[in-house]
């Protein structure tokens, strides 16, 4: 089973002293419309290449929370990260759930 976080767990973790790295795997126009602070942005289609080149900017020894629009692309990215030895978890429901359940001031999610 794929490790996952609810948006509530993500919000608590991000507010804590040891916040996870936050990887957003949506497309650039989606991130430009609405995103969370302190993200690392790598579109899903570029993730494998960035990992191969060592250009993700992610620390493989620190947990990574992976987010997208609704959880599908981030689930794929989480699986890729796990295969590469990262500590990663998929954010269930993605930005749609985060906006609905945590922060309704976030602009509408494309």
Image: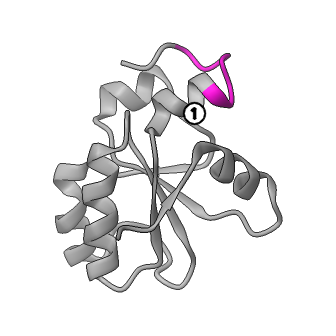
The reply to whether the magenta stretch includes residue 104 is: yes
- Rendering coords of residue 48 (x, y %): 19, 66
How crowded is the residue under tag 1: few (<14 C-alpha within 10 Å), some, or many (20+)?
many
Q: For the point 28% across and 35% down, which residue is it? A: 27
Q: For the point 32% across and 39% down, which residue is it? A: 26
Q: Residue furthest front?
A: 1
Quadrant hosting residue 82: bottom left
In the picture provided, is 59 more to the left or to the right than 36?
Answer: left
Tally of marks: 1
In the picture provided, is 73 more to the left or to the right than 33?
Answer: left
Q: Main secondary structure of the magenta part?
A: loop
* Quadrant where the image shows the C terminus: top left
In the picture provided, is 66 more to the left or to the right than 102?
Answer: left
Quadrant hosting residue 31: top left
Q: For the point 32% across and 25% down, which residue is it? A: 29
Can see residue 19?
yes
Q: Could you tell me which secondary element the residue under label 1 belongs to?
A: helix
- Rendering coords of residue 21 (x, y %): 57, 63
Can see residue 43?
no
Q: Is residue 24 above or below residue 102?
A: below
* Quadrant where the image shows the N terminus: bottom left
- Rendering coords of residue 65 (x, y %): 51, 59
Residue designated by label 1: 98
Q: For the point 71% across and 53% down, which residue is it? A: 14
The reply to whether the magenta stretch includes residue 20 is: no
Colouring used for the render: one colour
| Residues drawn in magenta | 101-107
């Amino acid at each position: 089973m794929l490790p996952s976080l609810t948006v509530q767990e993500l919000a608590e973790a991000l507010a804590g002293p040891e916040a996870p790295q936050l990887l957003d795997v949506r497309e650039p126009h989606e991130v430009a419309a609405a995103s969370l602070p302190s993200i690392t942005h790598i579109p899903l289609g570029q993730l494998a290449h960035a990992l191969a080149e060592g250009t993700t900017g992610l620390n493989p020894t620190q947990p990574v929370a992976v987010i997208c629009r609704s959880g599908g692309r981030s689930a794929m990215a989480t699986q890729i990260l796990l295969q590469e030895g990262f500590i990663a978890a998929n954010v269930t429901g993605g930005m749609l759930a985060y906006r609905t359940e945590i922060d309704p001031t976030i602009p509408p999610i494309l």
